[in-house]
Every structure is written in C-alpha cells, then in structure tokens.
Amino acid sequence: WAPEAEGHGTDGVIKAFHKERGVIRPRVPIIKTLASAVTIGTGGSAGREGPIAQIGAGFGSILATRLKLSDRDRRIML
C-alpha cells in the first residue's frame, strides 16, 4: 500500500527531503505506525530511530500540506 514505508525510515525521509520537495504521502506515517506497533507488539525489532523519524516526518509533511507551506518550510517541518 505504501512501498516507501518499507525499510528503516531514515533513508526514505532523506530521499523525500532532497528529491521529493519534502512531500511524504499521508498513508506512509499511518502504515508505518501500524506496522511498527504490530512488529514491536509481537516481540520484533523495529529499530531505534527509523520508524519514529519516518512517522514524525510524515505527519510534518501532512501538516505542511494542510497549512499550505512553501517547499522550504515543508522541509523544515520534516
């Protein structure tokens, strides 16, 4: 449903920052939150910083879109 939600998270955030004008699709932080909760809840390892980096950046991108911020300000929100 969201291939960019795969992996560690920090790589996707860095790519969005440099190549996607800071845009992260709204479904990414939602799917990453659910996937991380299931992974951790079943005893798996989700990593230390990747999931929260991608979740936080995703919600920052959503907020920037709602507030109609510039690309520069959107990147700051990441």
Image: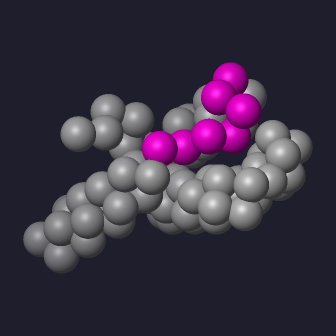
- Give the farthest residue toward the left: 42
Q: Is residue 44 left or right of residue 17?
A: left
Residue drawn at x 49%, y 61% as measured from the top left: 55
Q: Is residue 76 left or right of residue 66?
A: right
Q: Which residues are magenta?
A: 19-25
Residue drawn at x 64%, y 61% as measured from the top left: 66
Question: Where is residue 54 drawn, in percent x and y?
Answer: 52, 53
- Give the farthest residue toward the bottom: 41
Quarter of the figure with the C terminus? bottom right
Q: Can the viewer see residue 37?
A: yes
Q: Is residue 54 left or right of residue 74?
A: left
Q: Is residue 17 above or below residue 75?
A: above
Question: Where is residue 15 drawn, in percent x and y?
Answer: 62, 30
- Give the farthest residue toward the top: 19
Question: Magenta region's main secondary structure?
Answer: loop
Query: In front here: 61 or 55?
Result: 61
Question: Where is residue 11 drawn, in percent x and y?
Answer: 56, 36
Q: Can the viewer see residue 45?
A: no
Residue 30 part of the magenta segment:
no
Which quadrant of the structure image shows residue 47? Answer: bottom left
Residue 20 part of the magenta segment:
yes
Q: How is the image coloured?
A: one colour
